Amino acid sequence: MGHTFRQALVRQYQSWQNHNRLSNALFTSNLCLFTMGMMFFFDFLFVEDPSPFIKVRALSILALLPAYTLIFILNRLFQRSVLEKNAPLARFAESFLLLWPLFVYFIAYMVFCFSFHHEKFFIYYTGLHLGILYSTLVLYRFWKEQYFYNATLIFVGLGFYIGSPQSQKDYFLIISIASLVAWFVAFFLRREFVSNLNAKYTLFRSLVPEKIAHLLLVTDEKKDYSFAFEAKRRFTVCVCADWRNFQKLCYSKTAQEMHNLLESYYDLIVEDLEKSVPEQGYYFSWIADELFIIFYDDHDHRDVVIKNAIAFTLHLASSLFEKVQNQVSNEITFDIGVSAGVGLLGLQGPQRLKKTTIIGPVAGMAKRYEEEAKKHRKQKAFHYPAVIFDAQLEKNLKQHPFASSKGKLQEVIASTKDIQGQKVLLWTYTAHQSKTKAA
């Protein structure tokens, strides 16, 4: 479990880097250009002959402008993209564009400090170290670039320390030491950043579907999150599952024991859901023992929604149920209701407390179907979950190989409030019976 968590953390962090490297490069280029431009005036104040300094600053600006233009164009082209740019060449180019302004600044101030002889050495030497500090604070979120930058400065400082006159050795040694200290500071800042990134992702996942949470996580500039998953009418399939005898379990166990059961149970559900629907076309929610999943598709393809929902539900009612019994507790049993229909799905609610929800009969029907499933389970003493499907899913269920070969599907007339007299479909897993006989 810890290994899986670490992998998820790494994926989140890598995604954030890939989406934000260009925007950070643009910010860095802007600041370096601004600094070089503004310091023209201070060169006139600090030194008697500012012309060599002005020439170096002008050359620095000329070196920065092409990269800045390229960064600006690329950032404008890709700022709305929700796809990760995974090509190694693209990542290398973005890393170069991020590092280039920082190295230009460092080289310029090395020239100011050690190539020109003037009485304001310590002012420019302070500017050099401020550049190292600022660069590390910019780069700490990008570990490869930060390692490369600080390592380069350490070796440059040591190289000049070895080959420089005695009067300058201490200054180069201080550059190496400062870069080494910055390296360790960046390491601890990055750990905190990644931890906060995960906390942010966890919060987003509780509010919106997982793929929308991922988009919000990596798109820092997006302030109005309601537009990320705007409420609109969509075709959905809702799956509701409720534990049997939950209150009885609560009375027989401590709060901590129930906490552990629920956590382990939902961990298994989420892990399986992520594998079953890798495109993440769902919203997962729960309250105590009640699981509620809304399946949908960005392009409103009904066949895709139904296929994903049926596949997961059948798995939940069979092998996943067995896994819960074996790995969590054999006291956990549940029944399932599955409804289909159009509802208003998206971020809704009070302006400052919006969350993903669905408005429409389809949501309430899933709960009613789950209650109907409980009735049939009590009457027929099913061990495996009883599943009540919406009648409009009959064709899809009959065509599903697992539903027809591993279980029993039958029409029943509902007797539960609000759906009384309606035709619904009862499915139960029967393959376990053949396993028992064979044993």
Image: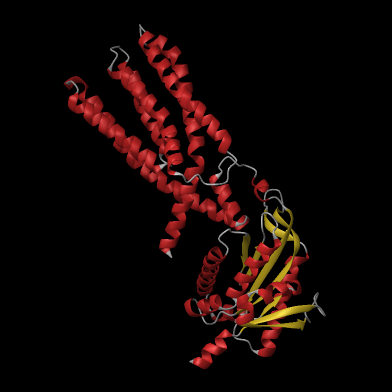
Question: Please, is residue 268 above or below residue 62 in the view?
Answer: below
Q: How far from the left and from the top, in percent, is residue 325?
A: 52, 80
Most extreme residue toward the top is 48
The N terminus, quarter of image: bottom left
> What is the basis of the colouring in this image?
secondary structure
Please give left or right for residue 226 compared with residue 184 in the image. right
Most extreme residue toward the right is 421
> Can residue 151 be seen by looking at this rendering?
yes
Picture quarter containing residue 307? Answer: bottom right
Q: Residue at horizontal 33%, vertical 17%?
A: 112
Q: How far from the left and from the top, in percent, is residue 8?
A: 47, 57
Question: Please, is residue 364 above or below residue 232 in the view?
Answer: below
Q: How far from the left and from the top, in percent, is residue 158?
A: 22, 31
Q: Residue at horizontal 30%, vertical 32%?
A: 153
Please tell me which residue lies in front, 152 or 177: 152
Please give left or right for residue 20 compared with residue 398 in the image. left
Number of dots carrying numbers: 0
Picture quarter containing residue 44? Answer: top left
Q: How far from the left and from the top, in percent, is residue 215?
A: 57, 48
Q: Residue at horizontal 60%, vertical 70%?
A: 312
Q: Residue at horizontal 58%, vertical 48%?
A: 216
Question: Please, is residue 139 above or below residue 237 in the view?
Answer: above
Please give left or right for residue 33 compared with residue 368 in the image. left
> Can residue 292 be seen by looking at this rendering?
no
